[in-house]
Image: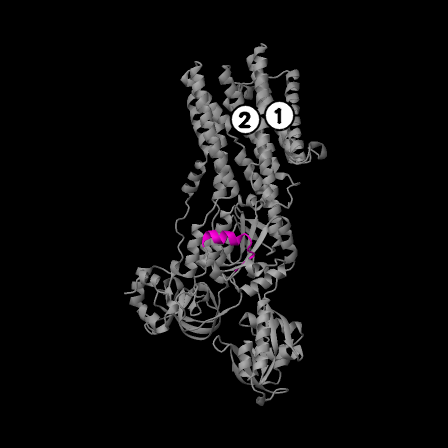
């Protein structure tokens, strides 16, 4: 009996048709209905399974894995139990907003596998019990004999057993636009999947001829199903996620040590265990920048909206930031650099070009009102229009004596006609492979050599060459090309200027790839091309070394693309992978940024992070530019929110060490972090200037660069020390404790608000730009000031937050401290600019 293990172990392309039927225990008359039902139970339905779906509870649970969220939850629960529900509500409000936003981002439907499944949800014609019938494609099984006709989607992987001029469009698997002629003879054991001429793959489209084949694999075991499995496996974090995770883990570790140390010091100094526990909670709350997740979400969302206006749709919010870090673009050739279609670019002949094209129209049997069957016929028909050749006139008064359609075995198409300018004795009008036509007309050895050299030269330049002959005369060559997209050379130059390498990945031949590279401005030498065959023989270390200078990878498979992506990533590159076919989807999924063109397959779009609506490669440049702007704005927010986190740690820790009352309570800290500071932080999303394309792509590769660390640590520590010193001085000067604590609260809340104006441009001093140019930021700061004043002067908020009104002179002190801090930041910017 046929088993799944047997099918896995058998290379059917290396078996004859008779051997295949024997292994599958089948015959040309097909299976019986009983056999089919039995096999359906063994192999299952011919569908591509989703695997493990992410369910809503699991997505929700993922939101609680963040160390920041866990600390807040612990602080909220402890505060509620020990200090009252009202105090805990503020903390839980911060948690709720962060969880809701995180859940919304992650709960975006993944469409890649749905699209893969749609390719085989069709009806198909099978032979069962010796009779041809139509059934749902999902019900076919290995051993079923299937009838293949023009226009049908191949329902599974099928070994051809009888064909007539059968041609299949395999572009969704290989990315190549030209149809593949099929054959029945057995191939070699180690033949790569994309070169198995006797197999019709599931999901591909029959474009010419007809055939009969036996199903060898179904569902997940087909070539399409195998790609689906690769798509499922590949899921990567973005660089921003990795940076934030690293920061969170390190901050959590450092915070735990800091809290533990202070706890021991406090107990040693005589504080009660319970009191020290409350202080630890306050420190934990103070260290968490509650507004950070909200602000970052808005920054990314605004960047995505800007990019949408430039015809780029970002499917995953965090991917928008990753675009700005891109250092390598791995681009597919067909449909990405090229238009993915055939176009007649030249007619090489010593006769009139119009006459040669006219004979080609006749030989291909092209008619006015009948749609051309294949891309070759379409290209010839379009060329006829450009040459102002009217199809009715070409065929007028002609009697068709005999017609031979093209097939992959003979490699020529022809017609014999009688009428004006054509005599039956003229013989066949033929279009086909030049070397085949040269043989048929009995060309001399010298003419054959000339034709071969010219054909080989044109093929190396990326052309597909077809010969035209009449009787015993070779008339010329028709040269077809998949045209380069408009403006590609200029676009590649822009990406190079931005410090980004462009590398071509293609399933096409080396010569064709070299020609395309030259046309788009990526001049490549022979040793800068790696073929799929060479790739398979290379270990990872050798591939790493070769990939540093590689410009082209030719004749490669989907697995090769996936391996190439990972090799570049292992070298620290941030990889953007472009593509349009099903075969690109695993690599699109694995890349840091998967980019699909709008005209590509739904599968590619589903696996991608960015979809180019206008199919314009230039949109990638716009996306990188927007991504770098996002990185700049994210940096500003992190500096803005983390600079006062150190203040909180310093103030509270210092108070414990010195043995005085805490200058801030947990609710005051939350009021500043989550309410006052959040609005200016969110307003950074609307910064438009700066962060344009720079020559060095790696300039934005790390969020926490030297300048950021200096601003956060040095300026933050300086402000913290000054603020704590002021608190200590005022207490020892005899001022009323609650008044001093309210002053520290107001200063702590306000100086960061004014700091926002200085952070608008990290590379320009405040005197050289309008600090109030971002109306959202100005409004956010104004609202933050109003919230601070409300906390000081509204009785309800005074009661909740434990504040007291400040006299006018104390308010002037608050403003003075803010100006001093702003000056320190400007001094730092000046220092780094000079450096």
Q: Is residue 495 above or below residue 467?
A: above
Q: Quadrant of the C terminus?
A: top right
Q: Which mark is residue 751?
A: 1
Mark 2 lies on residue:
646
- Magenta-tinted stretch: 539-553
In the drawing, does residue 453 fall left or right of residue 145? right
Contact, mark 2 vs mark 1 (Cβ under 8 Å): no
How was this image coloured? one colour
Magenta highlight on residue 129: no
Q: Can the viewer see residue 83? A: no
Depth check, front residue: 330 or 1: 330
In the drawing, does residue 176 fall left or right of residue 690? left
Name the secondary structure under disc 2.
Answer: helix
Magenta highlight on residue 541: yes
Task: Residue at 45% x, 60% y: name it.
Answer: 119
Q: Nearer the viewer, mark 2 or mark 1?
A: 2
Residue 547, image x, y percentages: 52, 53
Q: Earlier in the sequence, mark 2 or mark 1?
A: 2
Q: Can the viewer see residue 411? A: yes
Residue 510, image x, y percentages: 54, 63
Q: How much space separates mark 2 and mark 1, taking CA atoms? A: 14 Å
Depth check, front residue: 825 or 362: 825
Q: Is residue 247 above or below residue 497?
A: above
Depth check, front residue: 449 or 261: 449
Residue 786, image x, y percentages: 62, 26
């Amino acid at each position: 009996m046929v088993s799944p293990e047997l099918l896995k172990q058998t290379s059917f392309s290396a078996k004859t048709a008779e051997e295949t039927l024997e292994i599958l225990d089948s015959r040309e008359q097909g299976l019986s209905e009983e056999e089919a039902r039995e096999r359906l139970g063994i192999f299952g339905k011919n569908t591509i399974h989703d695997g493990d779906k992410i369910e809503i509870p699991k997505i929700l649970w993922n939101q609680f894995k963040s160390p920041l969220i866990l600390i807040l939850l612990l602080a909220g629960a402890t505060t509620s139990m020990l200090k009252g529900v009202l105090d805990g509500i503020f903390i839980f409000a911060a948690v709720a907003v962060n969880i809701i936003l995180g859940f919304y981002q992650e709960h975006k439907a993944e469409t890649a596998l749905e699209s893969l499944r749609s390719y085989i949800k069709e009806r198909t014609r099978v032979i069962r019990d010796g009779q041809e019938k139509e059934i749902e494609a999902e019900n076919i099984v290995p051993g079923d004999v299937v009838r293949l006709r023009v226009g049908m989607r191949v329902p599974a992987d099928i070994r051809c057993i009888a064909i007539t001029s059968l041609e299949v469009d395999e572009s969704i698997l290989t990315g190549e636009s030209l149809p593949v002629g099929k054959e029945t003879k057995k191939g070699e054991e180690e033949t790569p999947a994309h070169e198995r001429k006797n197999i019709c793959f599931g999901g591909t489209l029959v474009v010419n001829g007809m055939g009969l084949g036996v199903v060898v694999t179904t569902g997940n075991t087909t070539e399409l199903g195998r790609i689906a499995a690769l798509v499922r496996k590949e899921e990567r974090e973005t660089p921003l996620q990795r940076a934030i995770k690293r920061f969170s883990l390190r901050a959590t570790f450092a915070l735990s040590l800091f809290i533990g140390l202070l706890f021991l010091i406090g107990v040693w100094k005589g504080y009660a265990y319970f009191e020290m526990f409350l202080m630890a909670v306050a420190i934990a709350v103070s260290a968490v920048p509650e507004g950070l997740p909200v602000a970052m979400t808005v920054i990314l969302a605004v960047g995505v909206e800007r990019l949408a206006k430039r015809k780029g749709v970002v499917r995953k919010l965090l991917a928008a930031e990753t675009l700005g870090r891109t250092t390598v673009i791995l681009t597919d050739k067909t449909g990405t650099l090229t238009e993915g279609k055939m176009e007649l670019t030249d007619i090489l002949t010593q006769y009139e070009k119009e006459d040669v094209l006219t004979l080609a129209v006749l030989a291909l049997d092209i008619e006015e009102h009948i749609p051309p069957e294949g891309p070759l016929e379409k290209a010839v028909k379009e060329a006829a229009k450009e040459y102002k050749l009217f199809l009715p006139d070409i065929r007028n008064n002609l009697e068709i004596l005999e017609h031979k359609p093209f097939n992959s075995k003979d490699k020529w198409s022809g017609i014999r006609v009688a009428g004006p300018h054509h005599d039956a004795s003229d013989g066949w009008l033929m279009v086909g492979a030049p070397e085949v036509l040269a043989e048929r007309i009995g060309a001399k050895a010298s003419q054959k050599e000339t034709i071969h050299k010219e054909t080989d030269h044109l093929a190396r330049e990326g052309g597909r060459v077809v010969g035209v002959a009449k009787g015993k005369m070779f008339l010329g060559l028709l040269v077809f090309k998949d045209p380069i997209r408009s403006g590609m050379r200029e676009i590649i130059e822009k990406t190079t200027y931005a410090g980004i390498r462009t590398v071509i990945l293609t399933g096409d031949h080396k010569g064709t790839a070299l020609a395309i590279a030259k046309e788009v401005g990526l001049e490549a030498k022979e040793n800068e091309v790696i073929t799929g065959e060479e790739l398979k023989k290379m270990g990872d270390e050798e591939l790493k070394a070769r990939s540093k200078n590689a410009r082209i990878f030719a004749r490669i498979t989907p697995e090769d693309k996936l391996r190439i992506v990972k090799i570049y990533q292992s070298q620290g590159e941030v990889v953007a992978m472009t593509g349009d076919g099903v075969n690109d989807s695993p690599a699109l999924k694995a890349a840091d940024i998967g980019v699909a063109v709008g005209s590509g397959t739904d599968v590619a779009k589903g696996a991608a992070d960015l979809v180019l609506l206008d199919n314009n490669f230039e949109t990638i440049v716009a996306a990188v530019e927007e991504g770098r702007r996002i990185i700049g704005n994210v940096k500003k927010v992190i500096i803005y929110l983390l600079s006062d986190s150190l203040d909180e740690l310093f103030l509270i820790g210092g108070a414990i060490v010195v043995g005085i009352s805490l200058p801030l309570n947990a609710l005051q800290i939350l009021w500043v972090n989550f309410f006052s500071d959040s609005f200016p932080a969110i307003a950074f999303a609307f910064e438009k200037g700066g962060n344009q394309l720079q020559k060095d792509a790696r300039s934005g590769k790390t969020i926490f660069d030297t300048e950021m660390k200096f601003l956060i640590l040095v300026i933050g520590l300086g402000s913290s020390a000054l603020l704590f010193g002021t608190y200590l001085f005022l207490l020892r000067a005899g001022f009323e404790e609650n008044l001093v604590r309210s002053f520290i609260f107001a200063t702590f809340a306000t100086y960061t608000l004014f700091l926002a104006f200085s952070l608008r441009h990290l590379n320009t001093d405040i005197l050289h730009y309008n600090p109030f140019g971002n109306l959202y930021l100005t409004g956010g700061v104004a609202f933050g000031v109003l919230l601070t004043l409300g906390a000081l002067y509204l009785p309800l908020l005074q009661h909740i937050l434990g504040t007291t009104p400040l006299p006018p002179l104390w308010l002037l002190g608050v403003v003075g401290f803010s100006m001093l801090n702003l000056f320190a930041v400007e001094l730092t910017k000046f220092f780094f600019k000079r450096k």
